[in-house]
Structure formats: structure tokens, C-alpha cells
Image (cartoon, helix red, strand yellow):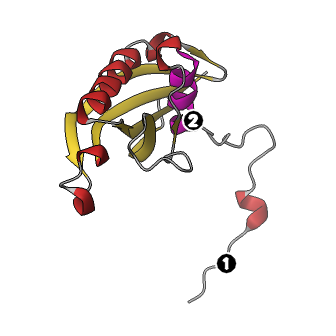
């Protein structure tokens, strides 16, 4: 038995249709915030290592690892993995400590159209070596997973 769909009966009157929530790019939001900070002067921040950077120069990589949409209040529960690189394990660790300290100020920053209401560490600070370069300390990076609650305004 076929079920008929009556488009006219299902039509939503103009003005009553739900508005799609388009959240800001969480990677770009964090990247813009970090890049604007004087403590991060000269350190590239983005979703991938800069061209020509083999992981031995200072850099911060931001990767959205997941998250979810919460309908009420309208929140993006964004999970971001932050990786820092440097010329030595000590330098990569120091850069991560700097990033970690700066993240605490993110909920106080005005962002057009949205506001970060909370930053929480999901997985604490940890040192990682690339699986293919375990014996090369120049390839050491540090990682931190955080959760951002981003509310539309």
C-alpha cells in the first residue's frame, strides 16, 4: 500500500519555519583567538602544519575531533584536539603550556554572532611521538583535547 504525501498540508507558513543554526568554525574561532594574542606572535596556528614545516618548528594545529548540537539552548558542543610542535620536546611543551593558559580567557572574548560559554579539558596534556619517528625527538608534539560550548546569540 502506497502512502500519499500531501505537500500542501505539510507546508509551513512563511515565518514559522525553523531557522537552521549555523555555528562558527570552531577551529577558526580558536585559531583567530590564539593568533591575535601577543604571546603567540610568530607562531603559525591552523588546521594543518604550515607548508614546509616538518614538525620541528613552532606551530599549533587545531583539529575538530567531534562534538554535538544541543537544541536548547542552541549550543555547539565542539571537541577540539590541539597539537603543538617545536624544535625540541621542551619547546613543544612550553608552547602547549602557553596555549593551555590562553584558552582560559576564551569564554571572555566577544565573537560576532556567538559566545564561547565554557572551555573544558577532555583529555589532559600529553606528549606524543609520531609512530613513524619514535626515535626522532624533533618530531615530538604535545596534544590536548578540549570541549568548547559555543552558544549562538
Which residue is at a point 20% across and 39% down the rendered structure image?
A: 127
Specify the quadrant of the image occupied by residue 146.
top left
Q: Percent from the top left, x then y, of residue 77?
A: 41, 36
First in sequence, mark 2 or 1: give its number.
1
Residue furthest to the bottom: 1
Say which of 50 and 35 sits in front.
50
Which region of the structure is painted magenta?
26-37
Specify the quadrant of the image occupied by residue 82.
top left
Disc assigned to residue 65: none
Disc assigned to residue 4: 1
Q: Percent from the top left, x then y, of residue 74?
A: 51, 31
Local packing at callout 2 (Cα closer than 10 Å; few below 14, some 14-19, many 20+) is some
What residue would you read off at disc 2?
28
Measured along the vertical axis of the image, is residue 131 above or below residue 62?
below
Which residue is at a point 58% across and 18% down the rendered structure image?
A: 36
The reply to whether discs 2 and 1 touch (Cβ–Cβ < 8 Å) is: no
Which residue is at a point 48% across and 47% down the rendered structure image?
A: 53
Which residue is at a point 48% across and 37% down the rendered structure image?
A: 71
Measured along the vertical axis of the image, is residue 34 above or below residue 122?
above
Is there any visible trace of residue 6 in the rendered image?
yes
Q: Chief secondary structure of the magenta span?
A: helix
Q: Percent from the top left, x then y, of residue 76?
A: 47, 35
Measured along the vertical axis of the image, is residue 7 above or below residue 85?
below
Q: Distance between the residues labelled 2 and 1?
A: 45 Å
Mark toward the viewer: 2 or 1? 2
Amino acid at each position: 500500500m502506497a502512502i500519499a504525501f500531501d505537500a500542501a498540508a505539510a507546508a509551513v507558513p512563511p515565518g514559522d519555519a525553523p531557522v537552521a543554526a549555523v555555528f562558527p568554525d570552531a577551529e577558526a574561532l580558536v585559531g583567530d583567538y590564539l593568533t591575535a594574542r601577543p604571546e603567540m606572535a610568530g607562531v603559525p596556528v591552523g588546521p594543518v602544519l604550515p607548508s614546509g614545516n616538518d614538525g620541528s618548528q613552532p606551530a599549533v594545529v587545531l583539529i575538530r575531533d567531534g562534538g554535538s548540537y544541543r537544541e536548547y539552548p542552541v549550543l555547539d558542543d565542539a571537541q577540539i584536539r590541539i597539537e603543538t610542535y617545536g624544535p625540541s620536546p621542551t619547546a613543544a611543551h612550553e608552547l602547549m603550556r602557553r596555549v593551555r593558559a590562553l584558552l582560559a580567557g576564551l569564554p571572555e572574548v566577544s565573537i560576532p554572532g556567538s559566545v564561547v560559554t565554557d572551555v573544558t579539558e577532555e583529555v589532559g596534556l600529553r606528549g606524543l611521538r609520531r609512530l613513524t619517528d619514535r626515535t626522532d625527538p624533533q618530531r615530538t608534539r604535545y596534544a590536548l583535547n578540549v570541549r568548547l560550548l559555543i552558544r549562538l546569540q
